[in-house]
Amino acid sequence: MSVERRLFFALSLPAKLQKQVIKWRAEHFPQDTGRPVTAANLHITLAFLGEISELKAGALTRIAGRIQAQKFSLCLDDIGHWPGSGVVWIGTKRAPNALLQLASVLRSHAARNGCHQSTLPFHPHVSLYRSATRPVAIPPATPDWQLEAEDFSLYESTYERGRTRYRCLQSWPLAD
Ligand code: 3AM
């Protein structure tokens, strides 16, 4: 039987921005808000692939390598809470077209390769807390962080000893 891995395409956050976000989160949310996402796991999901075979992962990896997409800059200037999924997030009020196009291309390739895609509209975000099911006092604003997206990556999600870990398997540069 072929081994399946839980994979997704995402944008990473530079280490400096990860630290800034973690510091700001600690200063603006009470400790019992939910399960905080660790600094290394902060990301923006572009397309969730689910548990897929090596064969399918290989096909999607080759497709990702042929995608022609532009660099873009993203302003993280929005915050919200989705009580249903228990996620507190930061996002953007104005998603750049290049980001929307990249996510759309990855999602349609994923769907064509049998990876079920959510019917909810794509809402780019960085999850800060999970399991935040109680009401959360949302700070009035973020510090308006800028994310310069220069590549996108394929990640594997594993769950070991009670911890979720995201491992970057491969990255592809975005064009100037
Ligand atoms: O951190 P975010 O919310 O961007 O929520 C999961 C996480 O995204 C999402 O995939 C990312 C990496 O785990 N995810 C998990 N299960 C999912 C599913 N069944 C899912 N997204 C869509 N459908």
Image: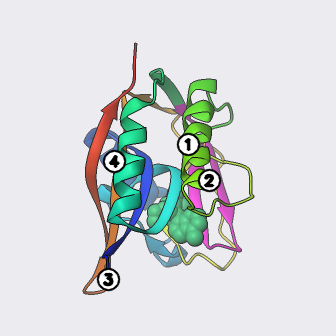
Q: CA distance from mark 1 to mark 4?
A: 14 Å
Quadrant of the image containing the N terminus:
bottom left
Which one is earlier in the sequence, the residue at label 4 or at label 3? 3
Q: CA distance from mark 4 to mark 2?
A: 18 Å
Does dot 3 land on a helix, a strand or a loop?
loop
For badge 1, the amino acid type reads Thr
Q: CA distance from mark 3 to mark 2?
A: 49 Å
User: Label 2, on which residue?
Assistant: 139
Q: Does 75 appear above or below 153?
A: above
Where residue 33 appears, as percent x and y from the top left, is: 54, 74
User: Label 4, on which residue?
Assistant: 18
Q: Would you call the spot at circle 1 few (<14 residues within 10 Å), some (14-19), or many (20 or more)?
A: some
User: Label 3, on which residue?
Assistant: 1
Which one is earlier in the sequence, the residue at label 1 or at label 4? 4
Quadrant of the image containing the C terminus:
top left
In the rendered structure, does residue 90 fall within the stretch colored magenta?
yes
For badge 2, the amino acid type reads Pro
Q: Image quarter for residue 2?
A: bottom left
Give the mark toward the camera: 1 or 3.
3
Residue beneath the point at 26% across and 43% down: 15
